[in-house]
Image (cartoon, rainbow, N blue to C red):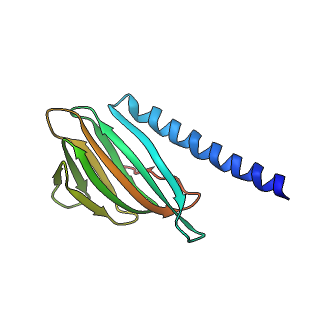
Amino acid sequence: MKTTRILAAALMIGGALSMSLALAQQFDASGIARTETVRDDIGDAAHEAVQVRVDFAPGAAFPRHTHPGTEIAYVLAGTVEYQFNGQPPVTLKAGEALFIPEGTIHSAKNVGAGNASELATYVVEKGQPIVVVAGR
């Protein structure tokens, strides 16, 4: 029984790492790098907290997407513009934060002259992909 649990945990961790690597590789070419800094249970069997650093090259944009939970985006450096369907863009500079409700379609773009970075903190459903790219 213990061996089964260890194997299941290893498969889950391996799957999460593969997903993170695939996502990072998918967006590195467009000037976006995502680095997961922590992932842990929050005391609720259905949810976990995940924190990701997102680095944007000048002019780089992350496409329209959603998350299976809430996101708090905190801009560490530069200027990032967030676009929500049917709403005017929200522009944040270093030191400013934004709450993004679960399932909200949005995009993010570095609109500054240099590099930009954000720290994204998610409280999401376990077993779901952190980012789901939305159709046009």
Image quarter of residue 30: top left
Image quarter of residue 112: top left
Residue 73's x, y, as percent? 30, 55
Residue 80, above or below 122: above
Looking at the picture, tell me which residue is in the foreground, 117 or 66.
117
Residue 29, above or below 108: above
Residue 133, above or below 45: above
Identify the residue at image location x=20%, y=52%.
95
Horizontally, is 61 left or right of 111 in the view? right
Q: How many marks?
A: 0
Looking at the picture, tell me which residue is in the foreground, 81 or 76.
76
Residue 27's x, y, as percent? 40, 35
Image quarter of residue 58: top left
Residue 126's x, y, as percent? 57, 61
Q: Which image quadrant: the N terminus?
A: bottom right
Looking at the picture, tell me which residue is in the foreground, 126 or 83.
126
Identify the residue at image location x=66%, y=50%.
12
Residue lying farthest to the top in this orientation: 29
Residue lying farthest to the bottom in this orientation: 44
Horizontally, is 23 left or right of 120 in the view? right
Residue 7's x, y, as percent? 77, 49
Looking at the picture, tell me which residue is in the foreground, 99 or 63.
99
Residue 5, above or below 11: below
Identify the residue at image location x=32%, y=42%.
62
